[in-house]
Image: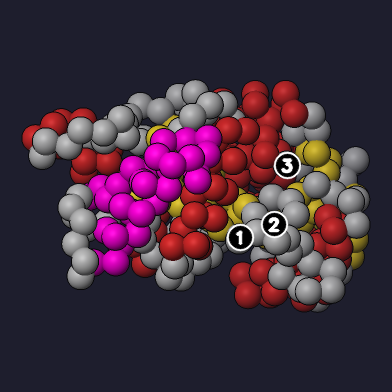
Amino acid sequence: MLKKLHELVSVAKSKGKRVISVAAAHDEEVLEAIAEAVKEGLVSPILYGNKQKIEEIAKHKKIDLSGYEIEDVPDDKKAAELAVKAVSSGRAQMIMKGLLSTNVYLGAILNKEWGLRSTGVLSHVMLFESPIAERVMCLTDAAMNVAPDLKGKVAIIENAISVMHKIGFEKPKVAVLAAIELVNADMPATTDAAILAKMSALKQIKGAIVDGPFAFDNAVSKEAAKIKGIESPVAGDSDILVTPDIEAGNVLYKSIAYFVRAKMAAIIVGAKAPVILTSRADTHEAKFLSIALATATA
């Protein structure tokens, strides 16, 4: 079980070096993150983007580009296409977003002809250092699925469980969040949570303990759970937090980022390979840790 996110680097190293393709790589923070990952021996990069800008950034940041494969592709849409094709052809094992629109990036990834679609649901998995639990925790889904139905939530949970298994959590505890911890027929998030908990008890969701509904406080605080009389192995001791929709997930994600200032890493899973989708506002450290997470799960 990871206590600190930087422990991901050791996990990633144990899996061996990966090839990463970067779409529109002419981005300062992305290139710094890639350079750190190269230095740590995690990746070999293929950079698609404006070669002149890439070299200017590298010179300014004193990044040694020897050993990097650079393809001069000034057009963002074409850069995304080529970066995706590098993965779908087996040339690379993961992909990272550079300085281009998320819509263009995801459009290439979801292309039906040469994209990275699989039979599963794509979902966003974010890891962060919890200041309460004093260990690494997971939040899902803050960026991909707008209003998942019950079937979608099962897939989102299974994606998160798979990630946690790969980084050393043998049987993660999954808290399905809602506004309250009681089942209320007028609040679909609570009824979905109860069904998901029952599915876990019946082994329809495997490899984890899933319970809910939980309000956020009694999912992360044993004291809050005790005060409310909640008896569950997940209460106050969750490893994975599952939000009811993208609004709740995104607000919680950004609250952790800006109010708590927690270290974090995030990837899209459920595709044929890990997809690194970071925000332009994310630090180079968050981008580097996202590369480490992708490497550990590729």
Marks 3 and 2 close (CB-CB < 8 Å): no
Residue located farthest toward the front when viewing the structure as drawn: 202
Residue 271 tag number: 2
Image location (x, y in percent) of residue 193: 33, 54
Q: Nearer the viewer, residue 97 or 210?
A: 210
Question: How many residues crowd around disc 2 within 10 Å: few (fewer than 14), some, or many (20 or more)?
Answer: some
Marks 2 and 1 close (CB-CB < 8 Å): yes
Q: Earlier in the sequence, mark 3 or mark 2?
A: 2
Nearer the observer, disc 1 or disc 3?
1
Quadrant of residue 56 in the image?
bottom right
72 on left or right of 270: right
Residue that numbered label 1 is attached to? 122
Q: Nearer the viewer, residue 242 or 80?
A: 242
Instruction: Please state which amino acid type lies under the numbered disc 1.
Output: Leu
165 on left or right of 211: right
Image location (x, y in percent) of residue 9: 63, 29
Residue that numbered label 3 is attached to? 298
Q: Secondary structure at mark 2?
A: loop
Residues rendered magenta in the picture: 187-215
Measure the alpha-carbon separation of dots 3 and 2: 11 Å
Residue 15 makes an appearance in the image: yes
Residue occupying the point 20% across, 33% down:
231
Q: Secondary structure at mark 1?
A: loop
Instruction: Please state which amino acid type lies under the numbered disc 2.
Output: Ala
100 on left or right of 219: right
